[in-house]
Structure formats: C-alpha cells, structure tokens
Image (cartoon, helix red, strand yellow):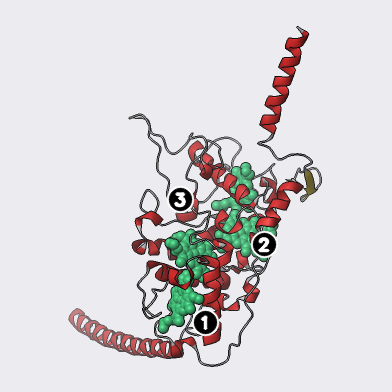
C-alpha cells in the first residue's frame, strides 16, 4: 500500500512538473498601474522579460551622410518616392533597406544584375516602393500612434523578406452540411491565441470598419444589438492585442468596466489609433500590391499578407522596446514634398476650372433670368 502511494506520488509529481514546463516559472512580479484596489496591475516574469530584451536589440546605424549636393531625382531615372533625397542619402537608404529586408540576397532581391537599376522588373521592387510610402505616411500622419519611436522597415521586417507575424483572411474550417460554423470553436489556432474564439478576428476590425463594442447601454437586454458571436470576435481581437504587446488586459482597461473610456488607461486610446492606422495600411497600401504578388506570397483566399499589432510589436509593449531608429533615418520620417511644377500645374488647372465654372454660372443666370422674364411676360 505504502509502495503504491509512493509510486502514485512520484507519478503525480512528474505529471505536475511536465504541466509546469508549459508555464512561466516563478517568481512573477507585479507593478501597480491603476488606482489602488482596481486590480490594474502588470504581471510579468523577469525571465520572459529578459528574452524580450534580447529579441529587441537594434542593429547599428550606417554613418549619416550629407543632404547637400545633387538630388536623386536629377540623376536617377525612376525614383518616385525618394527623388528629393541627396544621392548620398539615397544610396545610404538603399544599403539600409538591404540590411533590413534582404540581407542574404542583397541588392538583387529588388534589382536584376546586369539590368539598369531603374527597371521595375521584379515584383519585390514595386512592393518595396509602396512600403517606402507606407512607412513615410505612418511617420508623417499617424503620430497619434507611432509618434515618439517612429517606424522603419526594421520595425516589421527584422532581416526577413516578409515580416514573421502577418495574417491573411481566414478559411472557414470543414463542417457538417447544414451547420454554419462561423469560424468559432476551433481550438489550437494561433490567430485566436489558442482559445476557441473566432479564428479570424482581424478581417472585421483590421480590414473592415468593425467597431469593437459589446456592452449594452441599458441594464436589461433591451435594444441591444450585439450578438454573442460578435462579442466573441471582440474577445478574440482583445486576446491578440494582449498577446501581441505582451501585456494583460489591464494595460488598457479597468476590468470592472471594459467599455468605459473614462476608466481606461491612455494606452487604450493609443491602441484605438493603432487600430485605425493598421486598417489604413492594409487597405491603402498592402491590398493594392496583391496583383503583383506570386501565389506563394498569398493566403489561401488569394489575398496579400497583412499587418496586425504583432507585425510591429512582436511581443513588446512598444516595438523594439521604444528604441527610436527613425532618428537615424529621418528620410523615412515624411512623404516627399509634392514637386513644385506639379503644384503649379495643379494651381493652373484649378484656376482654369474656376473660370469655366464662373462662366457657366453666369451663362446659367442669364438664361434663367431670360426664362423668368419670358414667363413673367406670359403671366401678364
Ligand atoms: C527591398 C528592395 C530594394 C533593395 C534590396 C534595393 N533597392 Fe534600390 N530601389 C528600390 C526601389 C523601390 C527603388 C525606387 C525608389 C523610388 O521610387 O524612389 C530603387 C531604386 C534604386 C536606384 C535608382 C535607379 C534609377 O535610375 O531610377 C538605384 C541606383 C538603386 N536602387 C540602387 C540600389 C543598390 C546599390 C542596392 C543595394 C545596396 C539596392 N538598390 C537595394 C528597392 C530596393
Ligand atoms: C508595418 C509593417 C511593415 C513595414 C514598416 C514595412 N513592411 Fe514590407 N512588408 C510588410 C508586409 C505585411 C508584407 C507582405 C505583404 C506584401 O507583400 O505586400 C511586406 C512585404 C515586403 C516586401 C515583399 C517581400 C517578398 O519577398 O515578397 C518587400 C520587398 C518589403 N516589404 C520591403 C519593405 C521596405 C523596403 C520597407 C521600409 C521602407 C518595409 N517593407 C516596411 C510589412 C511591413
Ligand atoms: C492595447 C490595449 C488593449 C488591450 C491590452 C485590451 N484591450 Fe480591450 N479594447 C481596447 C480598445 C482600443 C477597444 C475599443 C475598440 C474599438 O472601439 O473598436 C477595446 C474594447 C474592448 C471591449 C468592448 C467594450 C465595449 O465598449 O463594449 C471589451 C469587452 C474588451 N475590450 C475586453 C478586453 C479583454 C478581455 C482584454 C484582455 C484579454 C482586453 N480587452 C485587452 C484596447 C485594449
Ligand atoms: C507600424 C508599427 C505598429 C503597428 C502595426 C502597431 N503599433 Fe502600437 N506602437 C508602435 C510604436 C512605434 C509605438 C511606440 C510609440 C511611442 O514611442 O510612444 C507603439 C505603442 C503602442 C502602445 C503604447 C504602449 C505603451 O505602454 O507605451 C499601445 C497600447 C499600442 N502601441 C497598441 C497597438 C495595437 C493594439 C496595435 C494593433 C491594432 C498596434 N499597436 C499596432 C507601432 C505600431
């Protein structure tokens, strides 16, 4: 009996040890972030934190060069995004881009050896041009989210041709006929952080204009329009937010009132701006590249690989733990100023259009007053 007990004990101990290896080992530390008693605490494991720090080291910057001298647009033949840079800055940025996106393949990942650099033969070059515009636009127009650290190609790519964490539109799993599956209750999917919530929380909120609101405005379920299904979509998205940033729900919310903006941390507002920025990246920049992409770069539904919170954050509350790489690459900080002659052309065109409109209105008024005079004459 005693021996049996001992064996049972040893077995249980072994099983618990096996189960524990799946968890973060103690000690866990907590930091109070909200009001006392609200439970708004950050819980973290120093061991995991060390791994995050190690994974978020920034490569050394290429020495800066002068912005003086001839412009790339004066020398090169096909530079739509970077023509306003000096030739030195342009070359430095090409070298940096190569380090960040195709360190193994080199310049030839986007340019064909033996052919002029101006040719747009490879799809990768065309995509890279869109990416340059997307990055410049994020830094210029989405300061409400990325202001501070800023974004470079490295924020997402980290030496990979395609960033490690991307998503494509979900495929409904196989299910029995007559039974509508709705993408729920599929265990062990990375996209829903291994919960059995929606396996594609991204399409409604990071591509379409879904607004993540689940809470009703009244105590009783009167006039409440959100379904359990849409609520589960929200929770799946929220699991992604937490997982992508390596934080608890309380990084953004006071969990006694998830919906209340007044009781939330300012990080939640920042996250909201992030959500709008990601939508714009996916719709305005990434989706339009889809026609150029080879099939192996598309998802099972034939769409381009897209951005979510993890594409930049990769498990850190701020990408690269807040390191500002943009300071070393200010050329990615804003879009090219519109060329002067284009502005003048546009101004001329507007002036011409205004003149025509005025003429048309005056002509219209004349014929209208003639009509009036005529009808007035008839009435008499
Ligand atoms: C990840 C893709 C990518 C890599 C890698 C890359 N380039 Fe480029 N390159 C581009 C894009 C995009 C443009 C066009 C930029 C624009 O439209 O302003 C360009 C344009 C150029 C041009 C201007 C050609 C012309 O006349 O229009 C030169 C020169 C050039 N690259 C040199 C290089 C060199 C040298 C390397 C390697 C150190 C390199 N590039 C690596 C994407 C890349
Ligand atoms: C916000 C994240 C993000 C940033 C910032 C970003 N990229 Fe991308 N990049 C992506 C995603 C997502 C894809 C896959 C979608 C696609 O191919 O259109 C991609 C694809 C690419 C590809 C195609 C690679 C292949 O093998 O198919 C190139 C080239 C590229 N990016 C270059 C760049 C350059 C250069 C920069 C900086 C100017 C940059 N990217 C900045 C997210 C990003
Ligand atoms: C990085 C910040 C952030 C984190 C972390 C986060 N949320 Fe949210 N949450 C938001 C934002 C922003 C919205 C509103 C989104 C919108 O308006 O489309 C929201 C909305 C919600 C809503 C809907 C509220 C309503 O008005 O009905 C619920 C419920 C919710 N979150 C629960 C959670 C849970 C549970 C977690 C942890 C698993 C979590 N959130 C983690 C930022 C966050
Ligand atoms: C293009 C890259 C990029 C993407 C995509 C992105 N973020 Fe961020 N995020 C940043 C940068 C950069 C910062 C740091 C800004 C600063 O220095 O204040 C940041 C900061 C934040 C912060 C503030 C964290 C803190 O504690 O200071 C929150 C919250 C956040 N992001 C949430 C999100 C959510 C949620 C998503 C997805 C909807 C998202 N981010 C997508 C780049 C990104």
Distance Cα–Cα, label 1 vs label 3:
36 Å
Is the residue 311 above or below the residue 197 in the image? below
Q: Residue at x 39, y 75 (%)?
A: 113
| Residues at circles 2 and 3 in contact by the CB criterion of under 8 Å | no
* Residue 280 in view, yes or no: no
Label 2 beta carbon within 8 A of ligand 4: no
As helix, strand or loop, the secondary structure at mark 1 comes to helix
| Residues at circles 1 and 3 in contact by the CB criterion of under 8 Å | no
Disc number for residue 90: 1
Q: Residue 271: which quarter of the image?
A: bottom right
Q: Residues within 10 Å of mark 2 (few under 14, many from 20)?
A: few
Distance Cα–Cα, label 2 vs label 3:
31 Å
Q: Residues within 10 Å of mark 1 (few under 14, many from 20)?
A: many
Q: Position of residue 8 (x, y in %)?
A: 71, 16
**Dot 2 corresponds to which residue?**
57
In the image: residue 36, left or right of residue 68: right
Q: Residue at x 51, y 92 (%)?
A: 70
């Amino acid at each position: 009996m005693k021996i049996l007990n001992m064996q049972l004990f040893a077995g249980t101990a072994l099983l618990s040890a096996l189960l524990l290896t799946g968890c973060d080992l103690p000690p866990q530390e907590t930091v109070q972030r909200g009001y006392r008693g609200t439970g708004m605490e950050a819980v973290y494991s120093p061991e995991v934190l060390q791994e995050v720090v190690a994974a978020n080291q920034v490569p050394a910057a290429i020495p800066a060069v002068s912005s003086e001298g001839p412009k790339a647009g004066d020398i090169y033949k096909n530079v739509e995004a970077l023509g306003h840079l000096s030739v030195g800055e342009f070359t430095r940025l090409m070298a940096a881009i190569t380090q960040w996106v195709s360190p193994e393949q080199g310049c030839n990942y986007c340019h064909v050896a033996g052919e002029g650099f101006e040719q747009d033969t490879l799809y990768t070059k065309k995509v890279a041009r869109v990416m340059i515009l997307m990055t410049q636009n994020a830094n210029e127009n989405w300061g409400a989210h990325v202001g501070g650290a800023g974004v470079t190609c490295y924020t997402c790519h980290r030496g990979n041709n395609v960033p490690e964490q991307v998503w494509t539109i979900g495929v409904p799993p196989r299910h029995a006929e007559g039974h509508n599956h709705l993408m729920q209750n599929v265990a062990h999917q990375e996209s829903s952080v291994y919960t059995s919530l929606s396996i594609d929380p991204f399409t409604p909120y990071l591509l379409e204009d879904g607004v993540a609101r689940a809470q009703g405005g009244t105590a009783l379920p009167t006039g409440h329009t959100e379904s359990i299904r849409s609520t589960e979509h929200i929770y799946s998205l929220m699991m992604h937010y937490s997982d992508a940033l390596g934080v608890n729900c309380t990084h953004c919310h006071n969990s006694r009132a998830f919906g209340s903006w007044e009781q939330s941390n300012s990080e939640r507002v920042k996250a909201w701006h992030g959500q709008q920025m990601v939508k714009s990246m996916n719709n305005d920049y990434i989706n339009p590249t889809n026609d150029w992409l080879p099939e192996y770069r598309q998802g099972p539904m034939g769409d381009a690989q897209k951005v979510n919170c993890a594409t930049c954050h990769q498990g850190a509350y701020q990408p690269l733990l807040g390191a500002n790489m943009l300071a070393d690459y200010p050329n990615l900080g804003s879009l090219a100023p519109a060329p002067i002659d284009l502005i003048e052309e546009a101004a001329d065109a507007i002036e011409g259009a205004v003149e025509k409109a005025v003429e048309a209105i005056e002509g219209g008024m004349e014929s209208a007053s003639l009509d009036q005079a005529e009808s007035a004459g008839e009435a008499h």
